[in-house]
Amino acid sequence: MAAVRSICCHCESRCGVLVELDDEGRPAAVTGDPSHPISRGFLCPRGRAAVDYYEDPRRLRVPLRRRGARGEGRWEEISWEAALDEVAAKLLAISEESGPEAVAYLNGTLFAGDGWFGNRLLHKLGSPNCGGAGLMCGGPQFAAGALTFGFASAFPEVVPGLTETVVVWGQHPAASAPMYWALIRQAQRAGAKLVVVDSRPTIESRHADLWLQPRPGTDAALALALVNLVIDEGLVDEDFVGRWARGLDELAARASEYPPERAAELTGVPAARIREAAALYAGRRPAALSSGTPNGQGRNALNLERSLQILIALTGNFERPGGNHLFGPLPEVGSEVTHDAFGEVPPEQRRKRLGADRFRLHGEGVELLSEAATRVWFGIEYPITRRSLGIAHPPSIFEAISSGDPYQVRALLLSHHNAVGAYSGSAAAVRALTDPKLELLVVHDLRLNPTSMLADIVLPAASWMEKPFMWSSGWGNLVATGHRVVAPAGERRSDYEFCRDLGRRLGQEWPDRVEDVYDEWLRPSGRSFAELLDSEQPWLPGTDQRRRHEQLDPSGEPLGFGTPSGQVELSSTVLAQLGYDPLPSYEPRTSQPEPDFPLYLMTGGTRIDATHQDHRQVPSLRARHPDPQLEIDPDLAAAHDIAAGDWVEIETEHGSIRQRATFTPDLGTDRVSAERWWYPERDGPTPSLFGYPEANVNAVTSCNLDACDPAYGALPYRIASCRIRREPDQG
């Protein structure tokens, strides 16, 4: 059988694959590509199930127009041309009557190379209201890096035999980044120590030399205690900090409020273990630190991530081989960040970005950060990634739809984004998407889901096998390409084709093919997409920007950092200018367990057989994990007469869902952990919406804007309160 070299896009790892085709040219099997420089032949269960994913009979093949009420499940087939004509006419009318800001766009996490062109579409329309999954994923980490180092976060660079310590904070790389986890294990075998910080016991904590288990939502207090110890015990890299950082005295005063003994009271982590963690991280260098989205910190999200980035700087692990490295933009390769037309939105329109008046890092903040970063990063206008900064706040979009405050959003476009299942407090999303004041809801996706069931127009999307691939995110030192494996089945169109064809109807100029865009991105490198794709090694290493702060500008002075001060900002000038606390701090939980709801409710543990909401619809993967699972300590289960495998009702003040109990020793008797974004369980039409309300934990959580991070807007995932009981009926 013939084999096509491509890139699996089932998660952000984007492993190299070889797709074997049968005699009819259909995908028959997928194996790992041993020549890929990162994955080296590895393939996880999602990759191995890629053919099943592609062949899923529930995938959409033709455009659909709603008949009857939203959510009723009555559709009629419509041509792409008629659908796009209808959508374009409505968008132009809304833009003329209410301004382009009345149109919003939300993007999910399909990791194909053309998954972000909707931002360009909206920006060219003149709307600032683009947002999506970045806010609730790595967004706070990216924002913390921009505030501290002047670009994104400093990424771990584990080098077996060189790295002495690895800290994994609130991250589950065994499931979410398997190649990184393999590297960590290799480093351990070469003598590195592993420190894991996680409120849940995980594979990583079982392999750790030291495991810190903070109470849910208290990670920021723990991180500040480590900052305090590094400063107080003389573990600061004085050469680096003295030359390149600002704000150490102010930071020291703030961190002194969190001695290990106080942090132990706040977090439940013994003071001796906090001291041991500080000694391992700051005393065994180089040390690499990585974080995930630990326990959905809400108001403390930026506090935590700022503290972690500061730890990297204080200890001299920044830009130290085997520590953490700042990947800047590649001057020789463009990306969806550099070509998303962000700067084409007039300033008066950018000021209308929903949520940016409240969460000011997305308004004036991104302007300040980008202006400073441009000086260091090759003069690129707005180099700060707009996946995570300068985005509209999704719950604020839902609020604007429902209330008309500060203005009415009349149309919403969604790409690969099950908004109903994705956001905490999903009832608000349902209210907004079924509100008659939302005159147009368009969904471009692979299949019907709880959100697309509410749409006016549903358009069938191509999967990663059905389109060419190039990944250039605007940071990193590798550009990867992959062949289109097969032509799109039915009437599916790629993200680029959807945006191009709609954009042209809106009077915008778009190149004919996505390959033409990739050629434009690659032009500074002197390569073409076809040339790179068909080369023996279809990956382009970018210029290593290591220690760029030491390089000299035309005047002979060091470039410094892309912050307003040109230094590593331990105390943020941008946060101060925006009226926020310039130093990281810790706010006590806003939703402490109460007598009626005595347990901490964590949500969102990652599994290797599913990415966020995706893959649960694939029969072969669903068979591996047929039911949503509630992690529960055996002692807590015994107190509630719950046996392993029992259905358990999980109740919050907002309602209840059910998941099956799975015993997790050492989880703790004050908490449970429920799986996230779960569906489908039932039929699609309302009120079922594929059964998401009975199993998806976001159906029973809140998205109170007051509980979001005050500067960034990070959502309050994983810090709810609940009670549990064994369901009497175990059918």
Image (cartoon, rainbow, N blue to C red):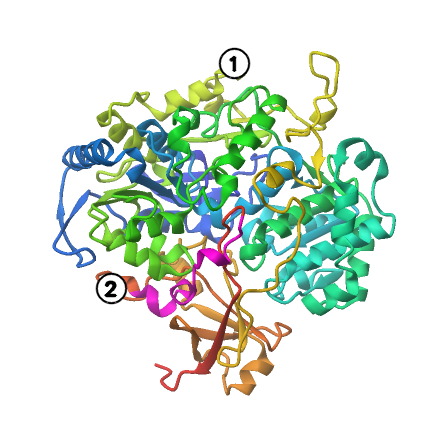
Q: Residue at x 64, y 36 (%)?
A: 573
Is residue 183 visible to us here? no
Q: Which of disc 1 and disc 2 is earlier in sequence?
A: 1
Magenta span of residues: 691-710
* Left or right: residue 462 compared with residue 591: left
Q: Main secondary structure of the magenta part?
A: helix
* Other-residue count near label 2 (Cα within 10 Å), few / some / many at <14 / 14–19 / ≥20: some
Horizontal and vertical percent position of residue 41: 55, 42
The answer to whether residue 84 is above or below residue 587 is above
* Left or right: residue 426 compared with residue 578: left
The residues bearing labels 2 and 1 have C-alpha atoms spaced at a distance of 52 Å
Residue 694 located within the stretch drawn in magenta: yes
Q: Residue at x 61, y 22 (%)?
A: 375
Q: Quadrant of residue 118?
A: top left
Q: In front here: 577 or 583?
A: 577
Q: In front here: 726 or 533?
A: 726
The answer to whether residue 221 is above or below residue 39 is below
Q: Quadrant of residue 731?
A: bottom left
Instruction: Give SS at disc 2.
Output: loop
Which quarter of the rendered picture does the N terminus lie within?
Answer: top left
* Residue ID for mark 2: 683
* Left or right: residue 342 compared with residue 144: left
Horizontal and vertical percent position of residue 629: 46, 69
Q: In front here: 500 or 184?
A: 500
Q: Residue furthest top?
A: 554
The amino acid type, in three-letter code, at marker 2 is: Asp
Instruction: Give SS at disc 1.
Output: loop
The amino acid type, in three-letter code, at marker 1 is: Gly
* Residue ID for mark 1: 526
